[in-house]
Amino acid sequence: MSEREQLIQPVIEEPPAPDEPQSPWMRAGLTVVRFLAAIAVPIVAFTILWLSFEWLREADVNRGVIVLVAVAVGVFGIFALYWAMDFAVNRMPERWRESVRPWVFVGPALVILSIFLLYPAVNTIWLSFLDARSESFVGLQNYGFVFTDDGMLRAIRNTLAWIIVVPSVSVAVGLGFAVLADKLSRGESIAKSLIFLPMAVSFVGASVVFGLIYDFKVFGAQTGLLNGIVQGFDGDPVAWLSQEPWNNLLLMVIMIWMQTGFAMVILSAAIKSVPDDILEAARIDGASELQIFWRVVLPSILSTVVVVMTTMIITVLKVFDIVFVMTNGESGTEVIAEQMIRWFFRNDHDGRGAAIAVVLFLAIIPVMWINVKRFRAEEEIR
């Protein structure tokens, strides 16, 4: 080959040699190190915190000292532990370093989630197969009770009614408020704040407020707002929360009042994200505002509407406070979550309470799956 041909010949770089495969002993050692790194931080942190709190509980010192020690242990102590673990990872062999480091920081969270979420879930499933005192195995007897007892069947029917009525009405009214608020030229933030305000009230607080509205007295003057209106029109006072099945609807009104603001805020943000060019093009084509809403705005925010609906369904499935405060589950107002609390803590039957909890958990899973699927679809679009 001539010198000229050697100069014009392209230079071909040899690919880097592949990493040598790790031996089974090295892989096993790496797994052990990852496991130890994952559990070291929570174990050490728990030990230090437990000893510190034991000292704080027994020490007869000034309250200011107790506060300082608690802050030092709770903030700087945990920071020091993570820093020490990171320092230890940096001293490992280079080929292990980046594989172990994530476990140092993610591992404690996984351990804590396992302790406070995974273990209670597994334990609840196991309890659902035991008797009232969790002493004897009874198989599917508790689940048979869930789907045959009259009170449980009423609770299931009422919960289905809550799932249909509350999210539908809350989203519809919230969407209406969002559209109207978007048309305001002034005072939009004030109007939205007033509508969103009930979200700041707890379920118990809202129940107490509506208890004053639905109040009925057998003797003496009526103090409830509804009965005051009825008597103002020369009618007889009504025991509203004893009127089946309307008492369930009156309880649903409380949650609708609270959740409408949430739906309005989320849907209002979605409406504002609709491109103005599309709206202007629809107006130029002669579409009315109503047609623009149904054919342009609503299809554009449909994914947000589904997310809000599914979120509300999950909240409705867990509702307990409103029923417990207002009617104590009487007069045909039982719901699944209320029955779970009743059998767990008032009737002292752990097996039935756990079975109801498992059924409630299984009912929530499809809704959560829809939410996750919707989020993934939106991420793919982005």
Image (cartoon, grey):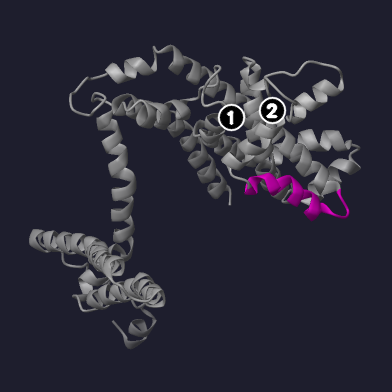
Write the residue at 51% across / 22% down.
334
Can the viewer see residue 375? yes
Under circle 1, the secondary element is helix
Q: Count neighbours of disc 2 (C-alpha within 10 A) and say few if under 14, some if 14 to 19, many if 20 or more.
A: many
Write the residue at 72% across / 24% down.
220
Viewed as shown, does residue 28 lie left or right of 166?
left
Can you tell which quarter of the image residue 346 is in? Answer: top left
Viewed as shown, does residue 233 lie left or right of 65?
right
Q: Looking at numbered disc 2 in the image, what kind of residue is underneath it?
A: Tyr
For the magenta stretch, what is the residue range? 184-200
Viewed as shown, does residue 284 lie left or right of 198?
right
Under circle 2, the secondary element is helix
List x then y, in percent, for residue 251.
Answer: 62, 28
List x then y, in percent, for residue 180.
Answer: 82, 42
Disc number placed over residue 214 in the picture, else none: 2
Q: Looking at numbered disc 1 in the image, what kind of residue is underneath it?
A: Met
Do labels 2 and 1 touch, CB within 8 Å?
Answer: yes
The CA span between labels 2 and 1 is 9 Å
